[in-house]
Amino acid sequence: MSNTERIAADSSFSAPTGTRSEGRGRRRITLRSAGICVTVTVLAISACSTKGQSTTTGDTSGSAKIGAGIKGDTITLGVLTDATGVFAALGKELTAGQQIFWDERNAEGGVCGTYKVKLDVKDHGYNVQNATSLYSGMRGDVLGIQQLLGSAMTAALSKRIEQDSIVTIPLTWAASLTDNPDMALLGPTYDVEVVNGLDYLLEEKKIASGDAIGVIYLEGDWGATTLAGASFFAKKHNMRVVEQKVTPSDQDMTAQITALRAEGVKTVLLATSPGQTASAATVAATQGLNVPLVGNNPTFSPGLLNTPAKDALIANYYNISPYPAYDQAVTQEPLTAYQKKFPGSAPSVTMLSGFASAHVMSEILEEACRKGDLTREGVVQAKQSLASIDTGGLLGKLDYSKPGVSPSRENYVLRAASTSGGLTTVRALYSGPTAKEYSRSGS
């Protein structure tokens, strides 16, 4: 995929919403029928074509301020993804999920019943320099960033995004991002996810007080946040943490697993690429380290189950995810739409993250419409005012009204399995007792 590729529109999908409770009937609700959308009348449309210029209608009763990223009846959202680097498979599925959502929303009348949303998709190849250059090129032409993939890329751009006042949905969950008012994280931060995962293992008696917790992690915000969660949990439960840091180029986890086995760890937390996860699982099985391997969502791809790591992953791998596996009813409409768009494909659950992220962005934009301010600043303020975004169970409820705090504490606990997406649900929207009391201060 080239840097300027845009995924073709296909308006065959209807976005699911409804209750989170298992076993209950889902409601199929569009933004209009839910009463969320407020149609706005925008005057002086000709002014919209000026790059970066803000236009005010003067009276916000039945009208809205507009600015950069809106031209005529089109809102442009940026996508900075990985289509050629180490997380290319995940990046493509994220983008596909986002496009599927917006295709249908556009077919239903768009944002506020007025604006169609266009995604400007660019490939940074999981390279920080590329990402910063591409951001510079798109920043004047977008209202928001629908996808910013990669911890290192997000860390490099966070300050600039805040200076530019552009609401951004990062596909990374570092706790530090909650301090940036422009960032809209999709669920629990990595540290909360780690604590939820460990709470689950403790509840299931797979680990116990006094055990050692191994952590293999990529350097950067992802790894640092994972370590913070592990350290908090260890302190609360009289455990100790054994660290093993890796770089993206490290693909053989033999040294790391050997070191953790020597320390007698009873579980291994992973903040690694899918390839590194496969290596860790294979080496652990070979060495007889039969312990739970626990990773955040980016650590897994269903393609791993077509490798020699399959049996080891099915035996011991747990995925602590903000969104569900495909065995949950709420996932079936997005999955059907994806398979219609890409016949014969079997997406990972990462596609659902893309779909859910577009749902969240639409809620933010609709709130900005309701408040009569579709400038970048108005969209940021709308995001900060939302305290209970409900995606119908694709994510836990999200609260963006508390700076510096994880927007959710609910995760899906998944296991590797020979099924669609490669994962199956063992606990839905789980929030463990230690996670509920977790704070970034570590107290």
Image (tube, rainbow, N blue to C red):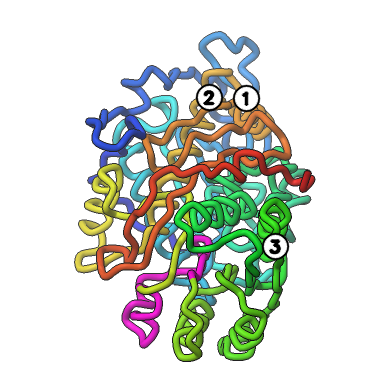
Q: Residues within 10 Å of mark 1 (few under 14, many from 20)?
A: some
Instruction: Return the residue at label 3.
Output: 227
427 vs 301: above or below: above
Quadrant in the picture for the C terminus: top right
The structure residue drawn at horizontal position 57% and vertical position 46%, both measured from the top left corner, is: 188
Instruction: Return the residue at label 1.
Output: 385
User: Viewer-proximal residue, 422 or 49?
Assistant: 422
Q: Earlier in the sequence, mark 2 or mark 3?
A: 3
Q: Earlier in the sequence, mark 1 or mark 3?
A: 3
In this picture, which residue range is highlighted in magenta?
292-314
How many numbered marks appear?
A: 3
Q: Which mark is residue 164?
A: none
Quadrant in the picture for the N terminus: bottom left
User: Viewer-proximal residue, 203 or 65?
Assistant: 203
Residue 48 image position (x, y, % from top left): 58, 33
Local SS, label 3 = helix
